[in-house]
Amino acid sequence: MATTELTDTEFPYSLLEPFPSPLPTNRLASSALRTLEVDAELSPFVRRTLTLAAPSPHSTSEPQEKKQKQDPDESQTVLQTTYRATTNRMLRVAVNGFMESLGVVLGVMAELDVDVLKAEAEREG
């Protein structure tokens, strides 16, 4: 059986750890994940992994009792992205392209999504 695990010799260049993109709700994080994973990496020299995760315990300001009552899936509000590439240039180009796509997705959410507008209004008010 062939393994799909990427070895360090095939794709030696990577970000040190997955870079997080926190979003206000699981629904928005899931939407971003589904939107971004549709576009596969064009280069066979780059591999990308997108996952959802819960924020680290010390990075949120929610009370502990609210976190405990929350559905585990609903707590996954951080889009984590991992990149591996055969060269440092391919890694840089792929990550730059991804950041542009992420910026477009977040911009559309900010313009059109009610949850984002509500969260901004609550912060300002």
Image (tube, helix red, strand yellow):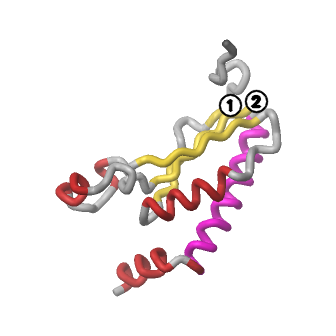
Residue at the image point whose x is 72% and y is 40% from the top: 91
Q: Is residue 33 above or below residue 51?
A: below
Query: Where does label 2 land, which residue?
Result: 86
Name the image quarter holding the N terminus: top right
Q: Is residue 17 left or right of residue 36?
A: left
Image quarter for residue 97?
A: bottom right
Q: Which residues are magenta?
A: 88-111
Which of 61/71 is in front?
71
Residue at the image point whose x is 70% and y is 52% from the top: 38
Q: Is residue 40 above or below residue 17?
A: below
Query: Where does label 1 land, which residue?
Result: 13
Question: CA separation, marks 1 and 2?
Answer: 6 Å
Task: Let me know if residue 95 is in the magenta part.
Answer: yes
Residue found farthest to the left? 65
Residue type highlighted by circle 1? Tyr
Which of 66/8 is in front?
66
Which secondary structure, mark 1?
Answer: strand
Percent x, y of residue 124:
38, 84
Classified by dominant secondary structure, the portion drawn in magenta counts as helix
Residue type highlighted by circle 2? Thr
Name the image quarter holding the C terminus: bottom left
Which secondary structure, mark 2?
Answer: loop
Residue at the image point whose x is 69% and y is 15% from the top: 2
Residue at the image point whose x is 67% and y is 67% from the top: 104
Percent x, y of residue 3:
65, 18
Image quarter for residue 105?
A: bottom right
Marks 1 and 2: CB-CB under 8 Å?
yes
Which of 100/28 is in front?
28
